Image: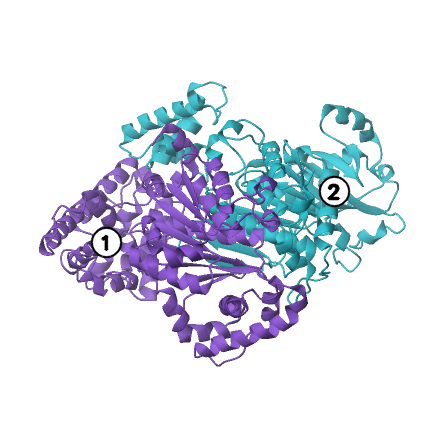
Chain colours: A purple, B cyan
């Protein structure tokens, strides 16, 4: 990467690294409709150095565009909106290839579905139900990721649609380290034995790493308890007392750390339910068409059931802890060596599986396998229903739960009403509340539609809040800049996660609640 | 200047929200076709910070009906800002952020007036801040937030029932981001917690113990901090380290590498060196856009009442899915900053200089080198030199006389205080009560007396 780009992107490279950046620079994004929601989403991606953008919009710039879209100014009036937005975006970053197509997205979806196959990802903004359902089918068929974004008055939504998204580097915020203190391997045990816990040199004593303290004392405990590790609350307390008894004085940080980490000697062995679900997924039955990710999961499953003895490959990194440099570096090497040997076993299994399914045994790189091993406990699979299924057969128990949960009240109301306004638009060829003189009539019309929609879904519970229906009509289809900037921001954040394949993207539908800001993701 | 054709219907979307009645709205919402114009004409908003959040905020506010905007920022534009601070271009590097940001937004949004202030927030006096109806903060430092918070809270007065007097409430909206995470909050001094009430939300940064750096380094960061905090001073006698000087940074990097090699530690890179030494917080466009938009929307709701407001603290986390959580925090009733003010009882014989001395010794204040203001008048100013000279003669006068012989009143003092071993600017509101003066009993209310 060039030095200038490195400086320019420094603050984001610290999040997704050069690999993440390279993925962004390879991606091509198509935006449908360049109102403020779409323009703001693209702006955030262009600043971050996305590869290319194609802005699709068939409209001309009108006065009201200047009230909510920063990419347009008075000189743009009457010109093609796609062209104006595109040229402003280009100004933000000349490394990005920016193109525009002056055509209505609805027409394009109708007449030229193959157009979308050229992109990595399509961001569809302000699209009505009819076009959206068609676009979803087109994108699924062409294996193009779809991100739906909508701003409507004080509400809006973001929804991702693709068959499946797999993440190796999910980079969770807090994740328990993998020290194997409940199950130390011979080399680690051996190293712990070489260190004398009752050393008289006080400097060495207070710089003995807690990994060593815990392994030695767990062994001592097990010897006195028929080979068992502390498991009950009382035993865990007694184990802490045992650690305390080895302190020379109360300010030894390493012993404090040992007490704090003492639960790690008795953490339940084996894998989390989250990982268990993944390795038992039907996709583990791999064949020649399986994605590399699932080949790795198949190998992981074998590893856990064989060499791993119920554990995944070791990650190999250890957190910082009070220690002499020499002890710490030795421990690092011991963990790294074990991780390396686990990796070699995994690699062999991957090669064998590839051979078995008729693929080139070297088709998957060492680096990919290594990265997978390092993140084996954190891999994540996101699956998305197609939008039509969600619309026609929602997950009723969830819907029921949301409708009766106070925290979800506004959010689920908005979810229903955002669909109801599209039905309204299909019936009346406009949004409810557009005209000042017809707001009251539109309220009862929208209510009828919303009730009908709920009953179509098979739901006959309490009606939606009248106040919310009223608000929806008050909005009159307005696209407010602040709301659009929020929705566009969330959409661009999700695009980054999807393209870099880092972090975990949104599942379900994110509903923005601009009234009290209690926005929610609904799994329907 | 503005094209009349462009004005026709330009605010169609925003006016739907402001001109129409609603069922779920804030207190005192008076919907009207002219509400947007009234906000534009009469509301003055201050944006503190013209960085990642500030650029977004200026755009969002300008497109939300605000027309009188000021922006204050002491920083100049750097190349590493360009991945998110969308109002700046490569050729702007080195220029004032506030000035360039103001100019760019005014170029694109006709009718909006943005006044830039290229200076430190401490350089402005209280009156400057008092002129705004609402303050929106887009900052990345706890100290700066704390300072602005104390300024906004200093205007707050309570009535005899300990209720905040509405005209003295200076609302604030505060945003902050770090990587994929962020927060937005609404502070209505006297009603919702101020920044200081739940300062525990911002724990101070943990520093490495010096003995670890000197004797038992284990990580790359330890080696870097050794070179930065210990080795630099050993080698460069007296020369201050400057994190913005690339030669200094390269020196620290090469020393850190040497040390890492000596101890067999991996992972020292130039990028990490910069990150550790400058305590760089990762920042991206999308998170800033999300948080700023939430803040701008709250600002609009506060000034117009067009919907309910956030009550009162929102956290955003985009690491796993998109999570928004709203928490209704409660005030610290004993808060030194947004409470009614620290009570100080004085004899009428106390001179201004004795009073100033007392502020340094006061157990709750520990205020060093304080300047003193009473009802907008400078009684004593430590700086600039010209003001110091002008106010010096007040030092030997009686405070009671300087305050017009009132039995009790509020007084503002600003100076520095030490927090976590770090000197910070701070401003405090004091309730001064003179002993044995008629009407000057030591009851708790003072606001009604002036």
- The answer to whether residue B149 is above or below residue A149 is above
Secondary element at image label 2? loop
Q: CA distance from mark 2 to mark 1?
A: 59 Å
Residue depicted at 69% across the width and 53% down the height? B303
Q: Position of residue B435 (x, y in %)?
A: 84, 47
Which chain is mark 2 on? Answer: B
Tell me: B312 left or right of B396. left
Which chain is mark 1 on? Answer: A
Question: A37 and B153: which one is in front?
Answer: A37
Q: Position of residue B325 (x, y in %)?
A: 50, 59
Q: Position of residue A193 (x, y in %)?
A: 19, 46
Secondary element at image label 1? helix
Quadrant location of the N terminus of chain B?
top right
Tell me: A234 left or right of B240. left
Residue highlighted by disc 2 = B131
Instruction: Determine the residue located farthest toward the bottom in the rendered image.
Output: A460
Name the mark nearer the viewer: 2 or 1: 1
Residue highlighted by disc 1 = A293
Residue depicted at 31% across the width and 47% down the height? A210
């Amino acid at each position: 990467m060039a030095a200038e780009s490195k400086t320019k992107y420094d603050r984001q490279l610290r999040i997704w690294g050069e690999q993440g950046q390279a993925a962004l620079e390879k991606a091509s994004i198509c935006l449908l409709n360049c109102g403020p929601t779409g323009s703001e989403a693209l702006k955030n991606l262009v600043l971050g150095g996305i590869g290319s953008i194609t802005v699709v919009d068939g409209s001309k710039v009108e006065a009201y565009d200047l009230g909510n879209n920063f990419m347009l100014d008075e000189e743009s009036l009457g010109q093609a909106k796609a062209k104006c937005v595109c040229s402003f975006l280009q100004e933000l970053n000349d490394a990005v290839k920016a193109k525009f197509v002056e055509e209505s997205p609805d027409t394009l979806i109708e007449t030229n579905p193959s157009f979308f196959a050229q992109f990595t990802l399509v961001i569809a903004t302000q699209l009505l139900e009819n076009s959206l359902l068609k676009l979803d089918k087109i994108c699924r068929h062409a294996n193009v990721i779809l991100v739906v974004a909508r701003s409507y008055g004080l509400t809006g939504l973001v929804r991702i649609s693709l068959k499946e998204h797999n993440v190796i580097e999910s980079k969770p915020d807090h994740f328990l380290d993998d020290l194997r203190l409940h199950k130390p391997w011979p080399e680690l045990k051996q190293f712990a034995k070489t260190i004398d816990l009752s050393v008289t040199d006080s400097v060495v004593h207070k710089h003995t790493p807690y990994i060593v303290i815990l392994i030695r004392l767990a062994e001592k405990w097990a010897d006195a308890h028929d080979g068992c590790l502390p498991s009950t609350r009382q035993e865990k307390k007694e184990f802490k007392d045992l650690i305390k008894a080895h302190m020379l004085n109360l300010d030894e940080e390493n012993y404090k750390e040992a007490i704090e980490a003492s639960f790690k000697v008795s953490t339940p062995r084996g894998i989390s339910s989250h990982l268990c679900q993944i390795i038992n997924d039907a996709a583990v039955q791999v064949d020649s068409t399986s994605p590399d990710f699932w080949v790795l999961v198949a190998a992981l499953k074998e590893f856990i059931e064989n060499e791993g003895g119920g554990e995944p490959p070791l990650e190999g990194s250890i957190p910082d802890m009070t220690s002499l440099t020499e002890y710490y570096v030795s421990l690092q090497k011991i963990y790294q060596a074990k991780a390396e040997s686990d990796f070699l076993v995994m690699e062999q299994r991957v090669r064998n599986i590839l051979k078995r399914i008729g693929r080139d045994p070297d088709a998957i790189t060492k680096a990919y396998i290594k990265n997978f091993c390092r993140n084996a406990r954190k891999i994540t699979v996101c699956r998305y229903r197609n939008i039509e299924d969600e619309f026609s057969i929602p997950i009723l128990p969830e819907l029921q739960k949301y409708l009766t949960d106070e925290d979800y009240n506004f959010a689920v109301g908005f979810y229903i009403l955002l669909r109801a306004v599209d039905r309204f638009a299909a019936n009346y060829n406009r949004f409810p509340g557009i005209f000042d003189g017809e707001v009251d009539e539109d309220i009862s019309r929208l209510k009828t539609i919303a009730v009908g929609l709920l009953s179509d879904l098979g739901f006959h519970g309490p009606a939606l809040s009248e106040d919310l229906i009223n608000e929806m009509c008050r909005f009159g289809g307005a696209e407010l800049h602040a709301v659009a900037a929020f929705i566009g921001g969330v959409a661009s954040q999700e695009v980054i996660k999807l393209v870099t394949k880092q972090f975990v993207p949104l599942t379900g539908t994110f509903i923005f609640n601009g009234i009290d800001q209690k926005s929610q993701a609904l799994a329907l | 200047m503005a094209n009349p054709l462009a004005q026709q219907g330009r605010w169609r979307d925003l006016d739907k929200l402001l001109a129409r009645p609603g069922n779920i709205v804030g207190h005192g919402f008076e919907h009207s076709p002219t509400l947007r114009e009234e906000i534009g004409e009469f509301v003055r908003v201050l944006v503190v910070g013209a960085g990642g959040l500030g650029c977004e905020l200026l755009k969002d506010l300008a497109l939300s009906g605000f027309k009188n905007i000021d922006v204050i920022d002491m920083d100049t534009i750097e190349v590493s800002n360009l991945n998110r601070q969308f109002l700046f271009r490569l050729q702007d590097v080195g220029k004032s952020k506030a000035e360039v940001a103001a100019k760019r937004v005014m170029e694109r949004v006709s009718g909006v007036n943005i006044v830039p202030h290229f200076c430190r927030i401490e350089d402005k006096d209280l009156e400057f801040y008092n002129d705004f109806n609402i303050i929106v903060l887009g900052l990345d430092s706890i100290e700066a937030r704390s300072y602005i918070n104390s300024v906004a809270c200093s205007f707050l007065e309570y009535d005899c029932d300990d209720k905040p007097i509405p005209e003295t409430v200076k609302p604030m909206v505060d945003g902050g981001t770090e990587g994929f995470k962020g927060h937005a909050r609404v502070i209505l001094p006297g009603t919702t917690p101020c920044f200081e009430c739940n300062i525990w939300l911002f724990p101070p940064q943990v520093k490495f113990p010096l003995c670890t750096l000197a004797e038992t380094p284990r990580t790359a960061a330890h080696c870097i901090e050794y070179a930065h905090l210990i080795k630099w001073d050993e080698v460069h006698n007296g020369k201050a380290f400057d994190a913005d000087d690339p030669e200094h940074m390269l020196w620290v990097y090469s020393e850190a590498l040497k040390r890492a090699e000596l101890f067999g530690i991996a992972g020292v890179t130039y990028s990490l060196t910069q990150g550790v030494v400058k305590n760089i917080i990762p920042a991206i466009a999308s998170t800033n856009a999300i948080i700023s938009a939430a803040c701008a929307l709250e600002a609009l709701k506060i000034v117009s009442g067009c919907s309910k407001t956030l009550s009162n603290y929102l956290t955003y986390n985009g690491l796993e899915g998109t999570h928004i959580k709203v928490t209704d925090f409660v005030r610290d009733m004993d808060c030194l900053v947004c409470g009614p003010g620290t009570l100080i009882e004085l004899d009428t014989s106390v001179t201004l200089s004795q009073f100033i001395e007392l502020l340094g010794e006061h157990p709750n204040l520990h205020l060093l080198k304080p300047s003193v203001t009473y009802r907008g008048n400078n009684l004593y100013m430590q700086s600039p030199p010209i003001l110091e000279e002008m106010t010096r003669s007040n030092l030997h006068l009686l405070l009671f006389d300087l305050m017009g012989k009132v039995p009790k009143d509020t007084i503002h003092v600003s100076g520095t205080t030490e927090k976590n071993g770090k000197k910070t600017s701070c401003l405090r509101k004091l309730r001064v009560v003179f002993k044995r003066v008629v009407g000057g009993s030591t009851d708790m209310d003072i606001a009604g007396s002036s």
